[in-house]
Image (cartoon, rainbow, N blue to C red):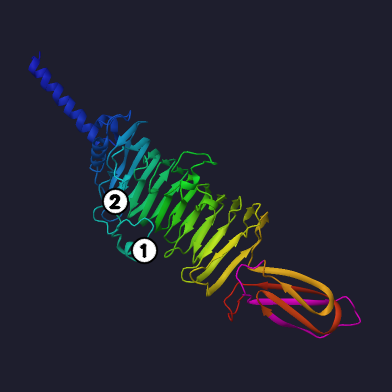
Amino acid sequence: MRLSGEQHYQRFLRSASARKSSTKKSRMFNLIEYGADPSGTLDSSEAILKAVEDAFKVQSASGMLWGVNNLGGVVIDLHGGYYKIGKPIRFPSGGGNLVFQGGTIKASDNFPSTGYLVELHSPQSSHRLSRHNSHSANRTAVHASNLGIYYEDITFRDVLFDANFRGGGLLVVDSARTRVTNCFFTHFLTDGILVEGGHETFVSDCFLGQHLTVGGDPRERNFSGTAINLASNDNAVTDVAIFSAAVGVLLRGQANILTGVHCYNKATYWGGVGILVRLPGSSQTRLDNCYMDYTGIVLEDPFQVIITNAFFLGDAYITLKSIKGEISGLNIVDNTFTGSSNSPIVKLDHSEKPFTHIDQVVVDRNSVRGMALKSTVGRLTVAGKGSQWTADFSGLLVFPDRITHVQYALHSRDRRSIPVHALTGVANNKVVVEATGVVDAVVSVAVDQYLMPGEVNHF
């Protein structure tokens, strides 16, 4: 049967409609097909927002947290494009199992300074962004009913986020099990990544820097912003390099772990901080195998914090900052410190309030070259002929005028004379041993600052 021209045209329209419908049902969304400009010449905000909106409609299935639709593994593919946007790309609420990958997103010159290039932020979220103000997520409520979580299993990979000094890179609010991997964040004004609420955001194999530099930059004193800002619980940052920012990683939540993080964002000399653990919510923090490159770690009233296997280069050190005057369960062990200024490896900042509650703190087994060793345990040997021996630990111990445990032994080098001797003084981190008579002796003293005074160590 021969078709008329009109019939051919109608068949073409039906075929095109079918192809378009098929595209909408596809699990792969190509931004270019939505009219986004991969050259970065034209603004692609609306095209990308439309693609994201359609991706969240492709499927609504169960299998995820209550209120979060399983999108089936849908992929929003940038296809190596360079897209300029004038507004944040905010994801619709209530979706999960989605991948955003493969290209560059850059803020235009009129991008709002308070925005983030990509935002997982539901209108229903109770969180108000505070950046550096302390906030701790309500773990009990979330675990009890899953209420308050609006995204799950969202993955960002192989994306370059260029904020063009207009705002931040990525915002994640009230999301569970989010992955950010093999991404690059630069030119952020506020944060490279900000996570508020939720839990289990994993950042791995990423590079973050406000300015593009490999160190020794004359602009370093003016670096600002925060590379990774976590006001959330149970997150992991792994194998990440932070090369320029005022603060490398800011932790404001509980049970976070950093492993293999290299911070050379802004030197301590210029006022920079590599890792800042801030109150409240700064408990159960683990920093393992990190590289602090001319910039240090600041802990505010640390509670159950572990710093181990780290490398501190260029006089980088750890600051214990008093807010409420409390430290409990702090372990700084098996780290390496290298410098040239003889600066202490651990410093106290109690200018506003002295530390009054110090319990279960261990600073020990650290390797130090060119810096001053600090520890909560110490051993000294004092030898000489006399009736009094003083072991001075004031240059070694972390906390002033605080020794909670002492052991000593007196060895008389004159076997014919073994006098009566006793511990007669423990003050200002000095231990005094006296004998009833003059004797040539060697006195060995061991002290620690581990426990609260008067507590019993149960081993």
Q: Which mark is residue 139?
A: 1
Is residue 246 part of the magenta span, yes or no? no
Asked which quadrant contains residue 348, the reply is: bottom right
Q: Amino acid at mark 2?
A: His
- Range covered by the magenta-colored residues: 396-425
Determine whether the residue tagged by mark 1 lies in a helix, strand or loop.
helix
> Would residue 290 be found to the left or right of residue 379 on screen?
left
The residue under the point 31% across, 49% down is 114
Q: Is residue 200 visible?
A: yes
Asked which quadrant contains residue 46, the reply is: top left
Q: Of 147 and 164, which appears nearest the observer?
A: 164
Quadrant where the N terminus is found in the figure: top left
* Spot occupied by residue 347 in the image (x, y as percentages of width and height): 58, 63
Q: Is residue 190 above or below residue 49?
A: below
Determine whether the residue tagged by mark 2 lies in a helix, strand or loop.
loop
Q: Amino acid at mark 1?
A: Arg
Choose mark 2 or mark 1, whichever is in front: 2
C-alpha distance separating marks 2 and 1: 18 Å
Circles 2 and 1 in contact, beta carbons < 8 Å: no
